[in-house]
Image: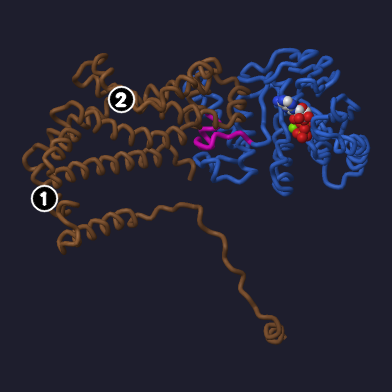
Chain colours: A brown, B blue
């Protein structure tokens, strides 16, 4: 009977249309993409359909990097850069989270500061470097200030948005159990806002690296930015790319660090 | 400690939500509030718990709360309101941490309430790993931890399926029988009201007034299934509510 029914009306399997929209970790895809692009460049420069003036040979860039590391110069450039990045970003992100939480919690501060932040956000911070040099000195001070200022605004915006999104019913719960104001902020508001704060941190730190290089290009003897600028002035593409590779690695490393932080702090999301 | 509501009235903007509510909540009793949707039951509970100020009338606490009571008026919320980033134990600990209990006391209280709600084995679990019924038991454990004088329960079972609801009702009856607690219990479900209430207050549609207060004398432990008296009371309550509910249903929400 089933046969005849199937014979009369064609049986069509229900087409699958679910799935997707759910990013899953795929460990090998990222590195594989990198490797494929590098292999392509290597092949192109070796075979000659990419001229050495367009793109340096990846293997030559690697050799330059190794030489740089051997000579100890890498360290001389990396150390000041990393210090600037750490100090500047710590200042900017720390202040940004504090101000963002305050904006999220107090209506008066919100009314006063949100327009101010909106006014500061679109200013290209690098344009203010001369001003920072006058205020904080030509040395490290102006670089710290530039990075701090650049990370401050996006952190503020991400943080107060995240605080706004904290489930109000959890805050009411805290109040109904007589928790102190400070306990509510520390145990309910901050952890609840953490997902938003951390995704803001990703953006802030990327901006920090950009500003770091810009500041070092405008006035520094040592630092990755200075190294890249010098190589660029001499049209030494291999060294230029070596510097760029270091920057990219820095970007990948900070992103991985935030990923690790997310796994630690946001494990409860499952 | 008893609670007395004296001529409570409340408005939201120009909408009058509650009118002239006078009600006693005696110590050691469960008072159920039933009424059509939107009649102001949750609002009344928030007024009793001090989360909002009544526009008219007063909420009075009569007598002293128990000596070791940490939070006299304690809510159990419909949506559980558990912190997703804290374990079961951590969620209970949250409401004790501010009180600077003597060393060891906090651990003892937590173990005790988790045992009473049959959650001891799940102390380390996160809320997302628990079923709805277990989440609400955690919320009840958390409320018991502060040894409340009055529990304010806003439809604590309505987010749960029917079987879980039955089980949790049994749990509540068992908890009450062991140590009678005072509660105001808001519900839509008349079966819950006649099962758990010593006193059932029926509210009218908005603005909510008290239409009738029904006393149920039978001890909680003896209220079983298909109990003719309880059925009769439930029918009576439904009779009171039906017209209100129908009329409320046909009103515009911002009417
Ligand atoms: N914060 C608020 N602001 C303005 N109006 C509100 C607020 N809270 C409740 N209301 C209104 O007050 C009325 C009573 O609301 P309430 O939540 O107390 O009703 P309820 O009896 O608990 O209803 P339900 O049975 O659906 O839970 C409703 O019409 C609601 O729209
Ligand atoms: Mg309600």
Task: Say which residue appears at 83% left-offset and 39% top-offset.
Answer: B190
Is A131 left or right of A195, judged from the image as shown? left
**Residue B224, percent from left and from top:** 82, 44
Is B88 covered by the magenta stretch?
yes
Q: Which quadrant does the C terminus of chain B fall into?
A: top right
Chain that bears disc 2: A
**Highlighted range, magenta:** B80-93
Is B118 covered by the magenta stretch?
no
Q: Are marks 1 and 2 on the same chain?
A: yes
Is B182 left or right of A94, judged from the image as shown? right
Q: Secondary structure at mark 1?
A: helix
Residue behind label 1 places its C-beta within 8 angstroms of ligand 1: no
Q: CA distance from mark 1 to mark 2?
A: 36 Å
**Residue B203, percent from left and from top:** 86, 29
**Residue B187, percent from left and from top:** 78, 35
Q: Which quadrant does the N terminus of chain B fall into?
A: top right
Please tell me in which quarter of the rendered image ligand 2 is found.
Answer: top right
Crowd tier of the residue under label 1, counting other residues whose Cα lies within 10 Å: few below 14, some 14–19, many 20 or above: some
Task: Say which residue appears at 10% left-offset and 42% top-offset.
Answer: A68
**Residue B86, percent from left and from top:** 50, 35
Q: Secondary structure at mark 2?
A: helix
Question: Pointer 1: what residue?
Answer: A63
Q: Earlier along the polypeptide chain: callout 1 or callout 2?
A: 1
* Nearer to me, A247 or A94: A247
Q: Is residue B182 visible?
A: no
Question: Pointer 2: what residue?
Answer: A127
């Amino acid at each position: 009977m089933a046969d005849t029914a199937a014979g009369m009306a064609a049986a069509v399997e229900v087409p699958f249309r679910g799935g997707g929209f759910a990013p899953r970790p795929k460990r090998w895809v990222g590195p594989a993409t990198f490797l494929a692009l590098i292999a392509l460049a290597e092949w192109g420069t070796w075979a000659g359909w990419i001229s050495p003036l367009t793109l340096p040979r990846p293997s030559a860039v690697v050799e330059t990097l190794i030489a740089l590391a051997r000579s100890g110069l890498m360290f001389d450039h990396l150390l000041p850069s990393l210090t600037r990045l750490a100090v500047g970003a710590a200042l900017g992100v720390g202040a940004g989270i504090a101000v963002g939480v305050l904006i999220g919690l107090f209506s008066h501060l919100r009314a006063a500061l949100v327009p101010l932040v909106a006014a500061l956000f679109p200013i290209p911070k690098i344009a203010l470097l001369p001003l920072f040099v006058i205020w904080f000195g030509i040395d490290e001070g102006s670089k710290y200030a530039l990075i701090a200022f650049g990370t401050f605004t996006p952190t503020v915006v991400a943080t107060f948005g995240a605080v706004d999104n904290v489930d109000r019913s959890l805050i009411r719960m805290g109040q109904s159990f007589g928790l102190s104001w400070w306990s509510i902020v520390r145990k309910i508001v901050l952890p609840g806002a953490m997902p938003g704060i951390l995704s803001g941190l990703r953006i802030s730190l990327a901006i920090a690296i950009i500003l770091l290089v810009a500041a070092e290009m405008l006035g520094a003897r040592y630092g990755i930015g200075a190294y890249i600028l010098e190589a660029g002035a001499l049209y030494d593409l291999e060294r230029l790319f070596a510097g760029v590779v270091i920057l990219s690695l820095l970007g990948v490393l900070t992103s991985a660090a935030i990923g690790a932080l997310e796994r630690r702090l946001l494990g409860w999301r499952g | 400690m008893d609670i007395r509501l004296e001529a409570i009235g409340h408005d939201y903007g120009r909408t009058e939500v509650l009118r002239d509510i006078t009600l006693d909540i005696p110590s050691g009793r469960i008072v159920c509030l039933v009424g059509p949707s939107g009649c102001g039951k949750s609002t009344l509970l928030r007024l009793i718990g001090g989360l909002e100020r009544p526009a008219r009338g007063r909420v009075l606490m009569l007598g002293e709360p128990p000596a070791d009571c940490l939070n006299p008026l304690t809510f159990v919320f419909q949506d559980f309101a558990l912190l997703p980033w804290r374990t079961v134990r951590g969620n209970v600990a949250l409401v004790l941490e501010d009180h600077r209990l003597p060393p060891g006391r906090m651990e003892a209280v937590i173990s005790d309430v988790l045992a009473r709600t049959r959650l001891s084995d799940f102390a380390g679990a996160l809320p997302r790993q628990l079923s709805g019924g277990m989440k609400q038991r955690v919320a009840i454990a958390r409320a018991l931890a502060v040894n409340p004088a009055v529990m304010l329960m806003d439809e604590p079972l309505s987010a749960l399926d029917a079987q879980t609801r039955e089980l949790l009702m049994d749990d509540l009856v068992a908890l009450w029988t062991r140590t009678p607690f005072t509660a105001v219990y808001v519900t839509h479900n008349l079966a819950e009201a006649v099962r758990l209430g010593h006193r059932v207050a029926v509210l009218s549609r908005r603005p909510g007034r008290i239409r009738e207060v029904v006393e149920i004398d039978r001890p909680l432990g003896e209220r079983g299934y298909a109990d003719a008296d309880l059925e009769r009371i439930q029918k009576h309550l439904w009779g009171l509510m039906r017209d209100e509910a129908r009329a409320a249903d046909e009103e515009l929400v911002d009417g």
